[in-house]
Image (cartoon, rainbow, N blue to C red):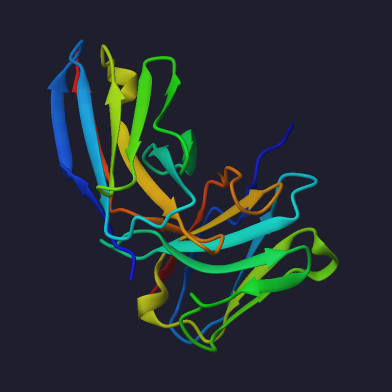
Amino acid sequence: KQEVTQIPAALSVPEGENLVLNCSFTDSAIYNLQWFRQDPGKGLTSLLLIQSSQREQTSGRLNASLDKSSGRSTLYIAASQPGDSATYLCAVRRGTDKLIFGTGTRLQVFP
Amino acid sequence: EAGVTQFPSHSVIEKGQTVTLRCDPISGHDNLYWYRRVMGKEIKFLLHFVKESKQDESGMPNNRFLAERTGGTYSTLKVQPAELEDSGVYFCASSLNRGQETQYFGPGTRLLVL
């Protein structure tokens, strides 16, 4: 059974810091891994999708890496801003189309 | 292009009542998914439609939940009768193709059963 864990559960940092959010999964046989952000009371916004054959993806200040063999992914946020405050979720997809989510990391960036 | 929309945004009902949630996927997306998050837990998969057919309904908790997607466009998720433990946020997502595509999520319906 695939389990997805995210560490830390919560993080509070001053503006400008570079951050690393961690996601680990127990079964390395995945098709892809997706990072989302969720703002309070809102839906999920897809940030980055990494296919199983890829090592990393970048979008603006965000960089996600994937190490399938060790069952780990990291989301790197450069020069954090208050607008980055949200809950960040990772989700893996295996042989079926369903996504298996972690419990998320709640990030607060203060000015 | 409109994203995934869900209706209602919030619903408060009493135990034993019936509630129907609606999801309109992104136009042209054949794949439609339902997920939910109950209090304090991670988001969990409920089921997956490809057009009007149920591809995977392994996540449906019990027979009080009925999902339909007549005509392969919008989908409804009915809970009848609702129980207290059904409270949570119900998300709908859609994708163009299966497999390696990004799933796009709606804003969710917040259901509270009293």
Which one is nearer the viewer's eye here, A98 or B84? A98
Give the image quarter of residue B37.
bottom left
The residue most toward the right is: B71
Q: Position of residue B65 (x, y in %)?
A: 56, 81
Pick the residue in front: B40 or B55. B55
Residue A74 on image: x %, y %? 28, 34
Residue drawn where x is 59% and y is 57% of the image: B8
Question: Residue B44, percent across and down?
Answer: 42, 64
| Figure check: B62 above or below B96 | below
Q: Is residue B106 above or below residue B12?
A: above
> Is residue B108 toward the left or the right of residue A103 in the image?
right
Q: How many marks?
A: 0
Position of the N terminus of chain A, as image quadrant, is bottom left
Image point 20% across, 13% down: which residue? Answer: A15
x, y (%) of residue A55?
39, 32
Residue B87 versus residue A3: which sits nearer the camera? Answer: A3
Question: Residue at point 47% right, 40% down?
Answer: A53
Quarter of the figure with the C terminus of chain A: top left
* Residue drawn at (37%, 21%) of the image: A62
Residue B11 appears left or right of A14: right
